[in-house]
Image: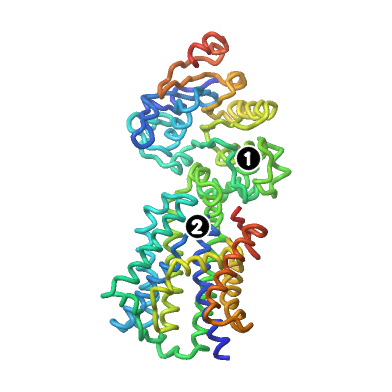
Amino acid sequence: MEYIALILVLICIYCILSLSLDLLVGHLGLLSMAQAGIAGIGSYCTGIIAIEQGFPFLLTVPLVAGATSALSVLVSIPTLRLHDDYYAIGTFGCQVILFSIFNNWIAITNGPLGLPNIPHPRILAWMVDTTSEYLILTSSILAICCLLVHLITNSPLGRVLHAIREDEVLAKSMGHNVVSIKVGIAALSAALAAMAGSLYAHFVTFVHPSNFSVTESILVLSMVILGGAASIRGPIIGASVLIVLPEILRSVGIPSSIAANVREIVYGIALVMMMAWRPHGLVGRYSFR
Amino acid sequence: MVRGPEKTLSALDVVTGYGKKQVLNGVSIETACGEVVAVFGHNGSGKSTLLKAMFGMLPLRSGEISLENSPLRGATPRDLLRAGLAFVPQGNRVFANLSVLENLKLGNLMLGRREELDENVESALEIFPLLKRRVRQLAGTLSGGEKQMLAMANALAMRPRYLLLDEPCLGLAAPLAERALSCIRNIADQHNAGIVIVEQRIREALRIADRVYVIRRGEVSYSGHAESLANVDLLREVYL
């Protein structure tokens, strides 16, 4: 039971992360490769604030989400001038820089040794220290995130996002302030990703640079593509499938020494197959072709 | 057609370009309500750049755009749409994954005209009745001619008094191009809109235009009445 709850917590965290990425990839058409890095900022900030300052969870999460959001605005000003493949390459560069900072800024991040002893969250009088309790917390936050994304993407602003995704020049010619909208959505996406990172740090109580590498960014992108972009259900299904898949692989007796490699091969095959035969994912509304 | 001299959209001595490259070196053009003005020129002469500059999508290095005697320096596309100027960019541009109706609503939503939304969309559809039957259809599934009609309808749904059209016949077969151009003439006549049209189909555009400008290397090399350019020798002289 504890094991299933643990898997469900991870699914909830990755659902938040893939929903945050879907705002950029599915709704704005910006292929970001830095979502794990952004979540990493959330995780490390949470770790540092919780360990050194002892801030409560209800203060830490909004603080970290706000700070990451502000940082993403600074980063997005040069990158949002890029389009299509160039944007993907630009964000890939950001991901590499972030990973390098996590791995090498030892005074702050503890470098390759990681940041241990991050406390479990306390919400007023509720100490969230069992996996079942954490599941309640993460699923509640996931539900709020789903509602937020649903409200935004089904509002007039959502239609404008899709218009920008379809044709930026045409959207500009209709008077939409494309740059402001892109910066705003990038900030919101970063805030959600940081929140996911923060939840992860509190849950695992240890963060390490390898949790926020390029491979992780590709994993989150795979979740969006596999499940289907520009929908709420898509990233949730994608995250669920790709978190459960390694567990299934483990249960069929693949040795743990090669399980990680097999898992990545399976991700790669899944991505190629989706692009070839189902470019809008399992339940998505936006095709990448 | 009776019109006052103040009812004009004008570009005066416009100088602009991209990065270090200066494309327009002091271009002046003008259109009045109810008038169709055609802008001709070779590829790369600066026609589309002129429209982008007039619509605030490209900053001016010098010169001035004014709408009915009000200078528009620093105005954004949103300001210009509110002031009554719309722009249809080149290439049958529509939002392919949105329905025809959603396409038509987007401009008004941006302008915050929710109350007039249905009325404005309906009036745009009156001009292009063919689109009426396809309002629920995805715009990406329309034919080239229908997409061009939708692109113009998108702009007209915002009730502009002045319209900038960048090569509206690009990629259209001759009969469809003729139909699109006659629609443009009707918009000017029936809605008293001032229209600037950049077009490569010179003969067809001359039939609907009142006045003509020819741009060469970023400067106006000829301006005059459309009939005068029907003279083949003169056309060759100013164009080639």
Q: Which residue is mark 2?
A: A31
| Residue A285 visible in the current orientation | no
Total marks shown come to 2
| Residue B136 visible in the current orientation | yes
Nearer to the camera, A201 or B178 = A201
Disc 2 versus disc 1: distance between alpha carbons?
Answer: 29 Å
| Residue B82 image position (x, y, % from top left) | 47, 41
Mark 1 burial class by Cα count in 10 Å: few <14, some 14-19, many 20+: many
**Residue beneath the point at 63% across and 62% down:** A281
| Residue B39 image position (x, y, % from top left) | 50, 24
Nearer to the camera, A59 or A117 = A117
> Which quarter of the picture shows residue A11?
bottom right
| Residue B195 image position (x, y, % from top left) | 53, 28
In this rendering, the answer to whether A251 lies above or below A279 is below
Mark 2 burial class by Cα count in 10 Å: few <14, some 14-19, many 20+: many
Q: Which residue is mark 1?
A: B150
| Residue A85 image position (x, y, % from top left) | 49, 51
